[in-house]
Amino acid sequence: MNDLTEQWKEGELDIGEVYYVKTERGVYKANGEYLNSASCIYGFDISYIIAPVPTYSEYIAVAKQLEIAVKRIEFLKKKTASPYYGNNVYLKTIHQMCDKTLRQIEELDK
């Protein structure tokens, strides 16, 4: 169980925050004021509190960090694909890891 779930059970979530809540039927958003006195949401028992919903500025900051990371990964991928390196197994592994990471990032955008 995470700290937010413990805070929820104690009725101590920040009433000004909005949280992602896990139930047996899926994930919902609810504010702390409601959650502090609730055991269910939309008729479904709350399993645990996942995380606070990020503000728009937090979302933009993470998106910028992700954009920089993608550029760095693409640069590394390009460098490790160079014929200059030949059959270096270590660099091939890095290249494959770059491919995998880029695919995972693409999945996040869907």
Image (spheres, helix red, strand yellow):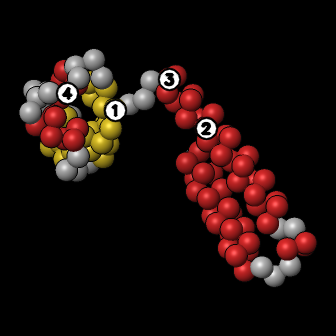
Whole-percent x and y of residue 37? 10, 26
Mark whose residue sits in front, 2 or 3: 2
Relative to 69, is 33 on the left or the right? left
- Vertical arrangement, residue 102 with respect to residue 40, above or below: below
Residues under labels 4 and 2: Cα distance? 28 Å
Marks 4 & 1, CB-CB < 8 Å contact = no
Label 4 crowd bin: few (<14), some (14–19), many (20+), radius 10 Å = many
Residues under labels 4 and 1: Cα distance? 10 Å
Whole-percent x and y of residue 14? 23, 23
Mark whose residue sits in front, 4 or 2: 2
| Secondary structure under the numbered disc 2 in the rendered image | helix
The residue at the point 82 percent across, 61 percent down is: 79
The residue at the point 79 percent across, 66 percent down is: 80
Residue at the spot of label 3: 56
Q: Disc 3 marks which amino acid?
A: Tyr
Q: Which mark is residue 52?
A: 1
Residue at the spot of label 4: 13
Label 3 crowd bin: few (<14), some (14–19), many (20+), radius 10 Å = few
Whole-percent x and y of residue 102? 66, 56
Marks 2 & 3, CB-CB < 8 Å contact = no
The residue at the point 74 percent across, 72 percent down is: 91
Residue 65 visible, this angle: yes
